[in-house]
Amino acid sequence: MHELAVTEYVFNLVNKSVEKNHLEKVEKIHLLIGDQCDYVPQIIEEYLQVMSEGTALEGVKVDARIKESKVICKDCGAEFSRHEFDRNCPKCHSDNLKLNRCTDFIVDNIEAK
């Protein structure tokens, strides 16, 4: 249910762009979502379908890419995804690691005419 608030944000942001740029139809919204956000792109798209009836966003599709959190080795500086290691740095084998959680939520681009 927490997708509702973020969907309203996306809808309002894209609508402002529609008005500012005199667009007729938004076909696709590209989102970049951090893997720690816990948003479900399909639910965002479903909410947008309901919100956008009768607007330039009606029938809009959502293309969401997931941005992975990164792990940084505090000893050698190597950076890698959470899925590229077991418990130690794959480069120097240190266990002195820091997780940089990716909580980004970005409207990266819209396709419109």
Image (spheres, rainbow, N blue to C red):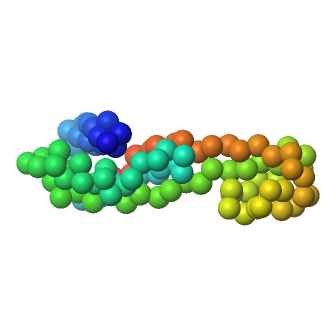
Residue closest to the eye, 8 or 22: 8
Residue 82: name its quadrant.
Answer: bottom right
In the picture, measured across the screen, residue 110 lies left or right of residue 92, that is left
- Residue at 86% from the left image edge and 50% from the top image edge: 95
Percent across and percent down for residue 58 are 15, 53
- Residue at 37% from the left image edge and 60% from the top image edge: 63
Q: Is residue 81 above or below residue 8?
A: below
In the picture, measured across the screen, residue 75 lies left or right of residue 14, that is right
Q: Is residue 65 above or below residue 34?
A: below
Q: Quadrant of the C terminus?
A: bottom left
- Residue at 83% from the left image edge and 62% from the top image edge: 90
In the picture, measured across the screen, residue 48 lies left or right of residue 94, that is left
Residue 100: name its quadrant.
Answer: top right
* Residue 102 can be seen, yes or no: yes
Q: Quadrant of the N terminus?
A: top left
- Residue at 58% from the left image edge and 45% from the top image edge: 102
Percent across and percent down for residue 84 are 72, 63
